């Protein structure tokens, strides 16, 4: 008789728009639009929840400028998450459960991004439907590669130390804010250049 995996029972606890930005002064080139995704997920065994941050980003591949991006948080309440821990107190998620939750979180991001872009010059751009069982492992691998980036620290003795850093949600949002600030600076510089050229004519 086969041992069946326990069923992970979950429900949606929170959906939150974590930020949307659009730069209508950046003209997208219809033949060179890039669409990328980002994901981060964390869980809390004591409080029985799993949380996803899912991001979509549109880029002009000719200029490498990002002209639209948005991030949405989805938190799932999980019944007795501690029952899925092993002897090392690590959560062993049943097969397909994370992919299923990611698929729901991704659909929330699609819906909110579509609402936010309505009425803009980019209203015709939508995030396509994806296969969560293909995209989730890919984004998870990207996260693991990033979180395991080795930072070499050479002390006075010439000893090389290695440390690993897993970015927190606050750090991710801070980085997004920093990137947004840098893009605004670029746009201001471009506007000043255009104004200067206009005044010369």
Image: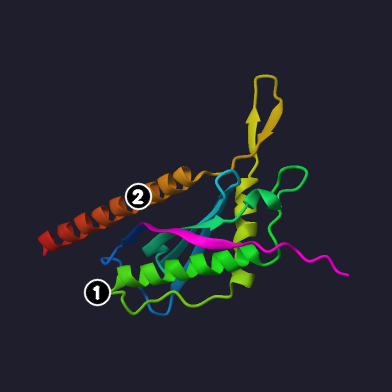
104 lies left or right of 186: right
Q: Is residue 51 above or below residue 126?
A: above
Q: Residue 111: x, y in percent?
A: 39, 71
Question: Residue 63 falls in which quadrant of the image?
Answer: bottom left
Q: Residue 98: x, y in percent?
A: 62, 62
96 lies left or right of 43: right
Question: Residue 58 falls in which quadrant of the image?
Answer: bottom left
> Is there a contact, CB below 8 Å, between mark 1 and mark 2?
no
Q: Toward the viewer: 63 or 49?
A: 49
10 Å crowding of disc 2: few (<14), some (14-19), many (20+): few
Residue found farthest to the top: 156
Magenta includes 78?
A: no
Q: Toward the viewer: 171 or 60?
A: 171
At horizontal 64% and vertical 39% (from top left) the residue drawn is 164
* Distance from Cα at disc 1 to Cα at disc 2: 25 Å
Provide the residue designation for mark 1.
119
Q: Quadrant of the N terminus?
A: bottom right
At horizontal 29% and vertical 53% (from top left) the residue drawn is 184
Of the two numbered discs 1 and 2 in the rendering, the one whose residue sits closer to the viewer: 1
Residues in magenta?
1-18
10 Å crowding of disc 1: few (<14), some (14-19), many (20+): few
Q: Residue 162: x, y in percent?
A: 68, 34
Q: Which mark is residue 182?
A: 2
Q: Earlier in the sequence, mark 1 or mark 2?
A: 1
Q: Which mark is residue 170?
A: none
Q: Residue 124: x, y in percent?
A: 34, 80
């Amino acid at each position: 008789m086969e041992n069946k995996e326990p069923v992970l029972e979950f429900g949606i606890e929170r959906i939150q728009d974590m930020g949307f930005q659009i730069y209508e002064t950046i003209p997208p080139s219809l033949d060179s639009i890039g669409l990328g995704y980002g994901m981060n997920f964390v869980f809390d065994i004591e409080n029985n929840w799993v949380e996803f941050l899912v991001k979509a980003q549109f880029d002009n591949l000719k200029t490498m400028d990002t002209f639209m991006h948005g991030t949405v948080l989805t938190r799932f309440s999980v019944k007795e998450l501690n029952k899925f821990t092993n002897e090392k107190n690590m959560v062993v998620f049943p097969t397909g459960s994370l992919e299923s939750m990611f698929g729901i979180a991704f659909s929330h991001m699609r819906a909110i991004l579509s609402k936010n872009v309505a009425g803009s010059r980019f209203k015709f751009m939508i995030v396509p439907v994806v296969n969560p069982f293909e995209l989730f492992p890919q984004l998870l691998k990207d996260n693991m590669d990033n979180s395991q980036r080795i930072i070499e620290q050479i002390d006075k003795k010439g000893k090389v130390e290695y440390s690993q850093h897993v970015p927190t949600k606050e750090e991710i949002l801070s980085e997004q804010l920093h990137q947004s600030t840098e893009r605004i600076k670029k746009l201001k510089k471009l506007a000043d250049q255009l104004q200067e050229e206009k005044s010369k004519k």
